[in-house]
Each structure stands twice: as C-alpha cells, then as structure tokens.
Image: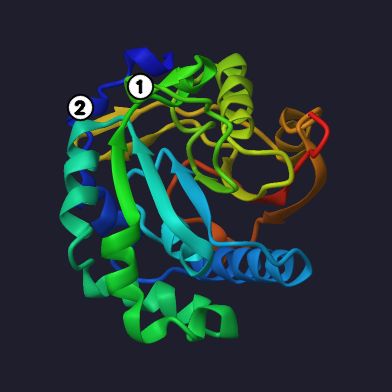
C-alpha cells in the first residue's frame, strides 16, 4: 500500500491519542530525554537568534513541537490528514493537560524550565498548523505560495516516513523530503518504528514499512554532517503490537549540501 492509497481522511486522532499519548509511556519519556539533550546541547554550542521550526507529519502528537519551543519564534505543524489538522488546531489555544507529563520530562533541562510558566501561551502564539503532504516538499512551491522549502532551522519527524506506506522507496523519499526542508546546519530529531508491519487506529488499518537501524542510518546518507542513532528495543519500548522497537535519530543537517 502506497501513501496515496491509505485512508488518511478517516484517521481518528482521539483514538490515536487514547492508544498512545493519554499517559506518558516509558518509550516516549526516553525519547524526550534524548531529544531534550540533543537540542539543548546544540544551542549551547551554537547560540543563535530565535529561529523557525517544523514538525513534519505531526499527526496527533504535540511533544515534538514542545521539544522545539524554547528556541522558536514559529513552529509549523505539517499534517496531511484532515481530522488530525482539526485536532491540532483545537489544541493550539490551550492544549490538553495530558501533554503536561511530556513537558515535565523536557522541563528537567533549564532551557525548558525557564519558559515553564508561559509554555501554553508560547504554544498558542508560535504554533501554526498547515495541511499538506510531506512529498509536496519536493516542489519549490509549498502551502500554495512560492517559498524555498529549505527555510526551517530546526526540525522533527516522529513515526512518519516508515508509517505512511509499505514501500521502502517512499520511506527513503520521506526522509529525503524532511532533510531538504531544513537549512544547512539545522539540528533535527526523527523517530521510527522498527520492524513495523502496519498499525490500527480505531477500525482502520494503516500501512508501515519494515525498517531497521541500518536502513534508517542509510536513509540520511548525503544529508547530514552529524548523526547519532539509538535503538530502543526493550519490552518497555514496545508501544503496540506489530513492531520490534523504536529507532531515534538525532543530528545536524550538512552545512555543505
């Protein structure tokens, strides 16, 4: 099943949140810890002006956007599925308290703690939701207006490239589109389900591509000057039936490509 064949407009965000994010899982706590350290260390070493970030394939998951919040004047949540877009826009004014446990993990770092009191106001003011297809980023026109897609200085992509198709070619294409959206030198974090054969949301089945850590690393070749991957494969990291672990990739876009 290719990406265009999947029933994205039937994707049920409330069912997805109930299955995955109503409570903080061990896997997400570990991912958040690594991502928090990666972004905080990057900006301590490379202090910069406030920048613009993007979360590609945001779905019904807010924690990638929260992980970029201390450094961004603007965060674009790019999402294809119509109901997910509506969910994200509904979260923008005052996101659900269930996301507070995810923020608490991030808040263990002072870069996050310093904005703790006004995190919801920052989220409301700085997040924008755009409906769009990841693969549209291959074109030089995005969101219906002329724009160079490599304009974001920080980016995330969580459980997207391997979870939209059964095709390894589309998986690699998805990673490439993510990387091309980032400016040279931009830090990024991406997560992938290892060994996934598909997943159910409500009464709908969605495709996935079976990838391992080697394939994830290979998909970034030619795009990065620095990358670290971690495999989370303990039983506590298995968040649903039908996958064998989680692969987290944190790195920096190549400054010379």
**Residue that label 1 marks:** 145
User: For numbered disc 2, what is the local secondary structure?
Assistant: helix
Counting from the top left corner in percent of width and height, residue 248 is at 65, 52
Q: Residues within 10 Å of mark 2 (few under 14, many from 20)?
A: few
Residue at the location (34% across, 27% down)? 132
Counting from the top left corner in percent of width and height, residue 72 is at 48, 60
| Alpha-carbon span between mark 2 and mark 1 | 24 Å
Residue at the location (55% across, 26% down)? 174
Q: Is residue 209 left or right of residue 199?
A: right
The label shown at residue 9 is 2
User: For numbered disc 1, what is the local secondary structure?
Assistant: strand
Q: Residues within 10 Å of mark 1 (few under 14, many from 20)?
A: few
Image quadrant in which the C terminus is located: top right
Residue at the location (53% across, 17% down)? 138
In front here: 36 or 208? 36
Residue at the location (42% across, 75% down)? 103
Image quadrant in which the N terminus is located: top left
């Amino acid at each position: 099943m290719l990406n265009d064949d999947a029933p994205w407009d039937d994707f049920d965000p409330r069912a997805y949140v109930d299955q995955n994010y109503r409570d903080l899982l061990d896997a997400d706590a570990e991912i958040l810890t690594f991502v928090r350290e990666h972004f905080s260390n990057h900006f301590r070493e490379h202090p910069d002006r406030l920048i613009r970030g993007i979360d590609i394939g945001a779905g019904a998951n807010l924690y990638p956007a929260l992980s970029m919040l201390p450094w961004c004047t603007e965060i674009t949540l790019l999402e294809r599925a119509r109901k997910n877009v509506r969910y994200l826009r509904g979260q923008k004014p005052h996101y659900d308290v269930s996301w507070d446990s995810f923020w608490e993990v991030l808040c263990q770092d002072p870069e996050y703690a310093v904005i703790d009191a006004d995190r919801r106001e920052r989220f409301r003011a700085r997040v924008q939701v755009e409906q769009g297809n990841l693969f549209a980023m291959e074109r030089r026109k995005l969101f219906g207006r002329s724009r160079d897609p490599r304009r974001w200085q920080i980016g995330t992509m969580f459980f997207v490239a391997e979870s939209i198709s059964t095709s390894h070619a589309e998986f690699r294409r998805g990673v490439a589109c993510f990387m091309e959206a980032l400016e040279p030198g931009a830090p990024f974090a991406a997560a992938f389900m290892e060994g996934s054969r598909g997943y159910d949301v409500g009464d709908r089945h969605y495709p996935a591509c079976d990838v391992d850590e080697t394939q994830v690393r290979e998909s970034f070749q030619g795009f990065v000057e620095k990358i670290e991957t971690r495999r989370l494969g303990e039983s506590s990291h298995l968040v649903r039936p039908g996958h064998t672990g989680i692969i987290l990739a944190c790195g920096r876009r190549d400054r010379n490509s």
